Structure formats: C-alpha cells, structure tokens
Amino acid sequence: MNRQEKDQFVSTMTGEITSAAAAMFVDFTGLNVETVENFRRKVRAADLKYTVVKNTLMKRVLNDCSIKDSFGVLHGTPTGVVLGFDDPVRVAKITCDFAAECEHLKIKGGILEGNSLNAKEALALSKMPGKSELQASILLLALSPGRNVLGQIKTPAGKIVGAIDKLVEMKEQGDA
C-alpha cells in the first residue's frame, strides 16, 4: 500500500469505526485458511464485517476516532477487526462463540460505543442478551398485564359456565 492508499484506508475505517455499534479485535495467528473462511462466513451471515488491519494503521484510525485506550491491545501480528453496525452484543457473541470453538482465535479487546473494552469485558458483553432478545422480553412484559386481566375475567366466567353445565346435567338426569 502506498501512502495515498493508506490514508484512504484510514479515512474509510475511521468512518466505519465511528458508525459501528461495536468492534472486536482478534488475534488470528495460527488459523488455517479453512477456519478463517468459516469465521468470515459466520460474520457475513450475521451481517457483520471482518477486516484484517495492520496495527499501525489501526492505531491511526483509533487516534482519529479519539479512542486511544485501545492502543494496548494492538501489538504483535496484524489484528482482525469485526464490526457490527446494528446490535453490539451480536458482534461480541459471534466473535466469542467462534473463539470458544477455535483455540487459535484470541479476543484482544474491542470498542463499544466509543469506549474501549479489554478481552474480559468483551467476553462479558457476549453473554448479555442481544437486541432482539431484549425487544422480545420488553414485548412480553408489555403484554403480561393484559394477559393477567384477561385471566382474571375469564376465571369467574368459567366457574359460572361450569356451574350452569352442572345444573343442566342435574336437570337432565332428574328428567330421565
């Protein structure tokens, strides 16, 4: 990459990091091609983006984004960056789940809404409920008072219907 291409890459990546809900940094040293391709497929299937970046370029990106706390995780081999633009938990779940399956993929850290995360915080983020799970539980909570009221109304009506049915049954047996 020449200087102009590097500047263009840093500019593009800065925009992506700024607009991303979360980013995870991974060390992919020791992964074979097949494993990397499996990881890329899982990332694409989850609507995420995976890019391999030289640490010096990533430091320039983070400097432009004013996220200098993450410099500590950017050392050694080039860093894999997983970006998610919708659900920050999904980024962590996909990355940490794959890291649990594959011994060579290591979580270096990440970024959540402009704040840096270390590896332990990234793992903790992966264990939280995702956006869709939270939406479902909120919907369930919103509907539960209506269900309770409906149950309270239905129960006495059911008792009355049961009593009428017994009365009818007793009358029929008395007539027979």
Image (cartoon, grey):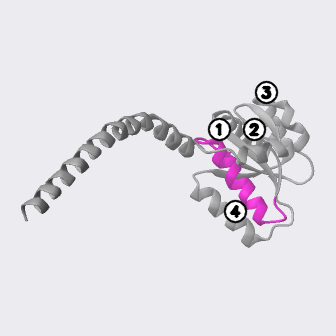
Question: Mark 1 and 4 residues: CB-CB less than 8 Å, in contact?
Answer: no
Q: Are marks 4 and 2 in contact (CB under 8 Å)?
A: no
Q: Is residue 38 left or right of residue 160?
A: right
List the residue tagged with mark 2.
111
Q: Secondary structure at mark 4?
A: helix
**Mark nearer the viewer, 3 or 2:** 2
The answer to which of marks 4 and 3 sits earlier in the sequence is 4
Q: Which residue is mark 4?
A: 39
Q: Badge 4 local density, few (<14 within 10 Å), some, or many (20+)?
A: some
For the residues marked 2 and 1, what is the alpha-carbon distance in whole angstroms?
9 Å
Check if mark 4's residue and mark 3's residue have beta carbons within 8 Å. Answer: no
Query: Does residue 92 belong to the magenta stretch?
Result: yes
Q: Identify the residue at image location x=75%, y=38%.
A: 111
Q: Are marks 2 and 1 in contact (CB under 8 Å)?
A: yes
Question: What amino acid type is highlighted by mark number 4?
Answer: Phe
Magenta includes 16?
Answer: no
Q: Which residue is mark 1?
A: 20
Q: Find the distance from the CA under tag 4 to the CA under tag 2.
A: 20 Å
Between residues 12 and 90, which one lies in front from this camera angle? 90
Residue at mark 3: 66
Image quarter where the C terminus lies is bottom left
Main SS of residues in magenta: helix
What kind of residue is marked 3?
A: Ser
Label 1 to label 4, Cα distance in Å? Answer: 19 Å
First-in-chain label (3 vs 1): 1
